[in-house]
Image (tube, rainbow, N blue to C red):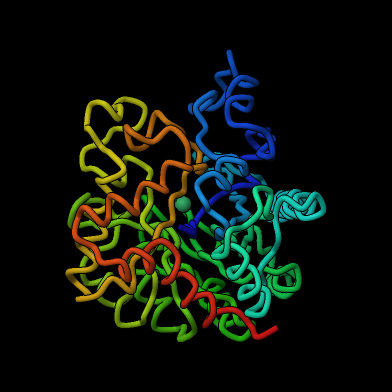
Amino acid sequence: MLLIDGHLDLSMNALEWNRDLTRPLAEVRQREAGKSDKVDRGRGVCTLPEMRRGKIGLCIATQIARYVAPDNPLPGWYSPEIAWAMTQGQLAWYRAMERRGEMVQIADRTTLARHVAIWKNNPSSNAPIGYILSLEGADSIVDLSYLERAYASGLRALGPAHYGAGRYSPGTGASGGLTPAGRDLVGEMQRLGITLDVTHLTDEAFWEALNLYDGPVWASHNNCRALVPHQRQFSDEQLKELIRRDAVIGAAFDAWMMVPGWVRGKTTPADTGAKIETIVDHLDHICHLAGTSRHCAIGSDLDGGYGTEQTALDLDSIADLARLTEILARRGYSETDITGIMHGNWIRKFSEALPES
Ligand SMILES: [Zn+2]
């Protein structure tokens, strides 16, 4: 069954991890043998062939580049212009994938409908993977005039925040509301028709952004605070507001967001027993709050800077997500629910969010 993944940092992996995602997974891992510059060297789980094997024919794919001020300890770039240039390199990689026929950008409803029809109808083994271009953290938008340029390149969604202090909004691990520039950014997103991705916003910025913005909303990769108490996850009040706004929430497979008490770099999947099925606890929780499964989807983040050391114990490749259909059925989800979670709910939201042509 077609699976839509609401969050993959494909181009970041290609450029910053130096991974050729067109190659077989075993080869990508092999090439990293002996390297230790990233924690997940040799343990990546996502390549384009593996996505095809798992019938992941469409995803929201990011550009991502953080600006860091001199006092910001997080990794990042030293000026907004450098961050912008990084995102343009990432865009160049997506374009090169398009030229090879590996990927295809989905920026309007007509292209979406055509692409979904191909993937629902026995796609060829080398069918291009569709991507909706999104920006994770808005630091690279040097000023608002850059947003218009980004839209022209196909940018259709934006999450103003990532980790720590941001130029437009503080994010995970930080506190406070949108910056004045962030409030302007949200207004400009509304004007251009760019979807608001509320993932990574602080609680304060979450409510502020939703008050300022009344266009389409999603949370590309978010789990439930009721199950894993941390600000990175959404509280029930936040989830209820997203349900009220008819948002779609992509469940993430970063293990520290799946099970409570995970210590990065210390806890192992075997310590917690976190499995692919563990994600269903999060889906169940949202379904119970909503009384329907129409807001649930997948946003795996399975190339977000970690690999097998920090995801479900029984997940070796992103293709293993295909097992969700059987797991959801076993957990009592109907055929309609399963189709919605695997792709239907994202398609509904994309159809509303994207321009006609
Ligand atoms: Zn993220």
The x and y percentages for residue 201 are 41, 63
Write the residue at 30% across / 82% down: 244
Q: Nearer the viewer, residue 21 or 86?
A: 21
- The quadrant in which the C terminus is found is bottom right
- The quadrant in which the N terminus is found is bottom left
In the image, 351: left or right of 238?
right
Image quadrant assignment for residue 250: bottom left
On screen, 308 above or below 256? above
Q: Nearer the viewer, residue 312 or 161?
A: 312
On screen, 34 above or below 176? above
Is residue 170 shown to the viewer in this render? yes
Write the residue at 39% across / 70% down: 248
On screen, 267 above or below 201? above
**Residue located farthest toward the top when viewing the structure as drawn:** 34
Image quadrant assignment for residue 246: bottom left
Write the residue at 66% across / 77% down: 108
**Residue located farthest toward the front when viewing the structure as drawn:** 122
In the image, 255: left or right of 135?
left
The x and y percentages for residue 280 are 25, 53
Image quadrant assignment for residue 328: bottom left
In the image, 185: left or right of 162?
right
The x and y percentages for residue 216 are 48, 80
Write the residue at 60% across / 79% down: 354
In the image, 221: left or right of 156?
left
**Residue located farthest toward the right when viewing the structure as drawn:** 99
The x and y percentages for residue 319 are 48, 42
Q: Nearer the viewer, residue 133 or 288?
A: 288
Number of numbered labels in the structure image: 0
